[in-house]
Amino acid sequence: MNAFADQLQATKDASRVFAALSEQEIETVLHRVAEALEQDTAVILEANQKDLARMNPEDPKFDRLLLTAQRIKGIAADVRSVAHLSSPVGKILEERTRPNGLKITKVSVPIGVIGIIYEARPNVTVDSFALCFKSRNACVLKGGSDASYSNEAVVSCIHRVLRACALPEAILLLLPPDRSAVQELLHARGFIDVAIPRGSQNLINFVREEATIPVVETGAGIVHIYVDASADIGQAAAVIFNAKTRRPSVCNSVDTIIIHRDRLADLPSIMKLQEKAGVRIFADPAAYKALHGSYDAALLEHAKDEHFGTEFLSLKLSIATVNDLDGALAHIRAHSSGHSESILAKDEKVVERFLREVDAAAVYANVSTAFTDGGEFGLGAEIGISTQKLHARGPMGLEALTSYKWIVRGNGQVRA
């Protein structure tokens, strides 16, 4: 018997209230949640400080956990953006009339109850609720223990709005932060329709292996940028700097630079901004030779096998040298997690082949991988970035939180 069966049943029951809600009522609730988050900024930051006090500031998760007044304002803005998006539910996806007179319509519907498992990212608590609520799904959240105070403060704020709007709090259920709650969520057949993990590769692997309910894999990003022989070096320096240092702790941060052998002489200038930012580089022999003497020796090391195919989530970067595009494609095939990959090149034939052949959720040409984000893709926010191919791929916005059903209208037809 599931230890949280009564709470999960209440959430499943609460998911049915969406059928009676108008789109205007849903928008109103989300706007009130945004206002409440801004009003509760001091309370939320106080809770967040309790969480931060338990974590080493050098931990890559620290920046993900950190909330500021500006970040809360941004989170509230994301909620308002979601509120303004068109509803993904009730859309006619297909319709046809059969020779026997049957009128068949394929219509988008909510999934029902969505379980989200995530680590030290309190913003995910808000994003998950907003996207689920807008798509008329109830949600069960299991945040990490590192963010327990922050998550509780945010959920308390949302629950207050739900009560004020005469809606059941159970639309949003926050499970306890202990690990046993993960097991209960992953085995909640009949209560939860799909689980979405957001976090490290270890978390995703655990969820995939343990779950007895459907899972959409998201999160782990082993990200590459290939610098082609035809690349603009000034552009390469700026794009790589942004992709590595903007927020090194997030999944769209670049982990490996793949450089064409003909551009090794330009590597010191490409990496100059990285040096100023204190980026630690693990370079293969050719790249190490190109950087030796021009890059801070304390930040430059010889690469080992484990430095490729690793999601660093910090100011660390590996560099691999290749002879041509084929070598870059082979390296990506061997080490990519299917998240985000980018090429820097002027040669259009090289660019088009890269875009065509690289198998990832987001593939870029002459752009920073930092743009792999639901907000940047115009989705309002994201529930996660799917690295699998079934149901959803890449940033998952509202439409990824729907399924569909077939509606068949007739006039007494029977099948021969």
Image (cartoon, rainbow, N blue to C red):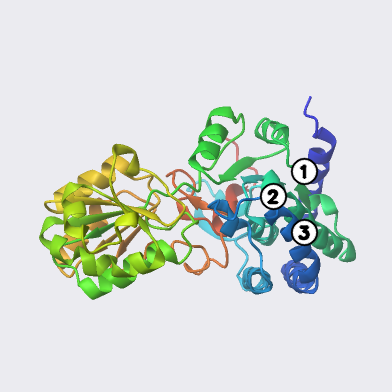
Q: Amino acid at mark 2?
A: Arg
> Could you tell me if residue 113 is visible in this image?
no
Q: Is 75 located above or below residue 59 in the figure?
A: below
Q: Earlier in the sequence, mark 1 or mark 2?
A: 1
Q: How far apart are the alpha carbons under marks 1 and 2?
A: 34 Å
SS type, badge 2? loop
Mark 1 sits on what residue?
12
Residue closer to the observer: 199 or 10: 199
Residue 214 lies, in percent from the top left, at 58, 36
Amino acid tagged 1 = Lys
Alpha carbon distance from label 3 to label 2: 12 Å
Q: Is residue 140 left or right of residue 414?
A: right
Residue that label 3 marks: 47
First along the sequence among labels 1 and 3: 1
Please state the horizontal and vertical placement of residue 382, each as a whole percent of the image.
56, 59
Q: Is residue 41 visible?
A: yes
Q: Amino acid at mark 3?
A: Ala
Q: Is 259 displayed left or right of 147 in the figure?
A: left
